Image (cartoon, grey):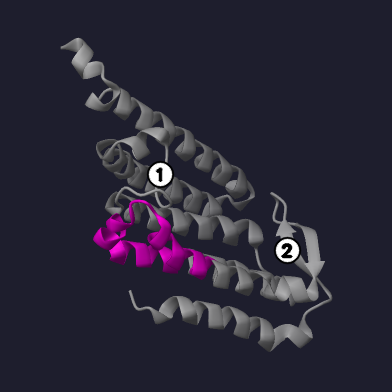
Amino acid sequence: MRKWIPALVIIIAFGASAAVYQDLPQRMPTHWNMSGEVDGWSSLPWAAFMMPVMLLALLAIFHLLPRIDPRRASYAKFKGTYDVLVVTMMVALLGVHLMMLATALGRNVSVARVVPAGVAILFIIIGNLLPRTRPKWFIGIRTPWTLSSDRVWERTHRFGGRLFVAAGAVIMLTALFAPTWANAVLIGCAGVVAVGLLIYSYVTWKSGPESGNASRRA
């Protein structure tokens, strides 16, 4: 993954805000309810440049994590995957930022459809990246059982990849064909994924040698 892509994302975010700044209202919509209706506003300077600043901070954090992680050596084994993850997260936030600007400028943006569809794409991409991750403290599915066993980590991430892709597909179909239900389905799918991975990692650990059950049975 080329190093200039995250920098380009940040430049686009700052540039977009600067380009339309004079046309933006003094109060910009920054939050929407489950129906896609605006229910929160922020002042112009903060709302216009909040996301670009967040992107800059996020890139700094992504650069810092491999240096402070106790298992930093594992980052070298999936550097390409890590780079794709960084770009994916930053492009997703850029999309949110551009949507906020468009809405503030009076464009007819179907937030109830666009946001769940964007999250669905994010789920599918993450689902394809998860099986390639290596054990570490800051990135990945971190439960007590995945962090205590490389075997549980690998199996949970393979299962998690399939679960994320399936959830993304369900959310996308809902966003396209039943947008009024999309946010509820998104929250439900996120809950199922979180609980499912927690249970799966525990069951995988419990049935393996890490729990000590094997030695007791022997």
Q: What residue type is labelled 1?
A: Ile
Q: What residue type is labelled 2?
A: Thr
Residue 88 visible to an observer of this rendering:
no
Q: Horizontal placement of 11 versus 154: left or right? A: right
Magenta segment's dominant SS is helix
In terms of depth relative to the viewer, which is nearer, 100 or 138?
Answer: 138
Q: Which residue lies at the image location 64% right of the left edge and 56% below the top edge? A: 112
Q: Do the residues labelled 2 and 1 touch (CB within 8 Å)?
A: no
Q: What element carries label 2?
A: strand
Residue 38 visible to an observer of this rendering:
yes
Residue 49 point in image, percent of width and height: 68, 75
Image quadrant containing the C terminus: top left
In terms of depth relative to the viewer, which is nearer, 71 or 22?
Answer: 71
Residue 64 point in image, percent of width and height: 45, 64
* Residue 69 located within the stretch drawn in magenta: yes
Residue pointed to by mark 2:
30
Residue pointed to by mark 1:
141
Image quadrant containing the N terminus: bottom left
**Structural crowding at the residue carrying mark 1, measured as other residues with C-alpha within 10 Å and reported as few (<14), some (14–19) or many (≥20):** many
User: Over which residues does the magenta segment extend?
Assistant: 58-87
Q: Which residue lies at the image location 39% right of the left edge and 62% below the top edge? A: 67
